[in-house]
Image: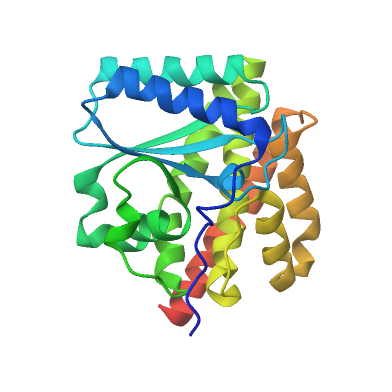
Amino acid sequence: MKTLPVLDELTPFQAPYMPVLLALVKQLQAEFSEQIHSIYLNGSVAARCARTERSDLNITLVVNRSLSASENRVLDTLCQQIAYRYNVITQVDLTVVTRDEVMTLASIFKWGFWFKHCSVCLYGDSLATQFGLFEPSWEIAKAFNSDIKTVLADCRSKIMATKSVTEYNVLCRKVGKKMLRSCFMLVAHRTSSLAYSEQQCADFFLHFYPDKTVDIERIQILINGPQVPKRAALFLVEHVGNWIVAEFEKIEKKIG
């Protein structure tokens, strides 16, 4: 079986994103120098296929200990300020994890795979060196989608409750991206490859599920706009989301 490719760490990043990357790393170092173990770039910017003013900046921050509530507020403010200053990105999508969490045996199919194949280290000692190459597997797909039901339910309830247009659009984008990535994970073990952009996720998925073209187009509208009515967003979360969950359970029963 083929091993999955890893992100290129030698090719320069797309020029429009260099200022924001430099600024983010510098500010993280300034605010959290003692807490930071390492900083990683993920997603389309890491894959050098980002679209100006359309792509998020996906960052994984590994810390030496769990951050306090006040530290998390500082981190949220920092990310908001970076996104405001640099309109080349839509937002900073930052995930925080402790080094101890990463290095547990139970996390190998999630964090081991994530740092080895989906991340470029921007600062610190790269955890990718702690893991070998991974083969395409259903275990990886399950590790990345174990939270699908929770995310769908949480986004659905928040979409129903919010009266803020800005928050509504953020929630639509979040749940749309989660569904699209989950669609890719349904077929990742059959592709021997990885998807780093939203379009790549869609293309890989539709190769195996061509009858889902309309659903994917609707998910892409949820992510990229134009804004859809709440009832349409909720229908999509329930209709497509429930299908994704059911399909995962179907595959799990088949191959375990």
- Which residue is pictured at 50% across the width and 81% down the height? 2
Classify residue 56 as left or right of residue 151.
right
Seen from the viewer's position, the closer of residues 199 and 122 is: 122
Vertical placement of residue 170 versus 137, above or below? above
- Which residue is pictured at 53% across the width and 35% down the height? 155
The percent position of residue 170, horizontal first and vertical second, equals 60, 27
- Which residue is pictured at 58% across the width and 76% down the height? 190
The percent position of residue 37, horizontal first and vertical second, equals 26, 38
In this rendering, does residue 78 appear at all? yes
| Colouring of the image | rainbow
- Which residue is pictured at 37% across the width and 57% down the height? 110
Vertical placement of residue 155 versus 43, above or below? above
The percent position of residue 92, horizontal first and vertical second, equals 53, 29
Residue situated furthest bottom in the rendering:
1
The percent position of residue 49, horizontal first and vertical second, equals 68, 47
Classify residue 176 as left or right of residue 203.
left
Viewport quadrant of the C terminus: bottom left
Seen from the viewer's position, the closer of residues 115 and 162 is: 115
In this rendering, does residue 241 appear at all? no
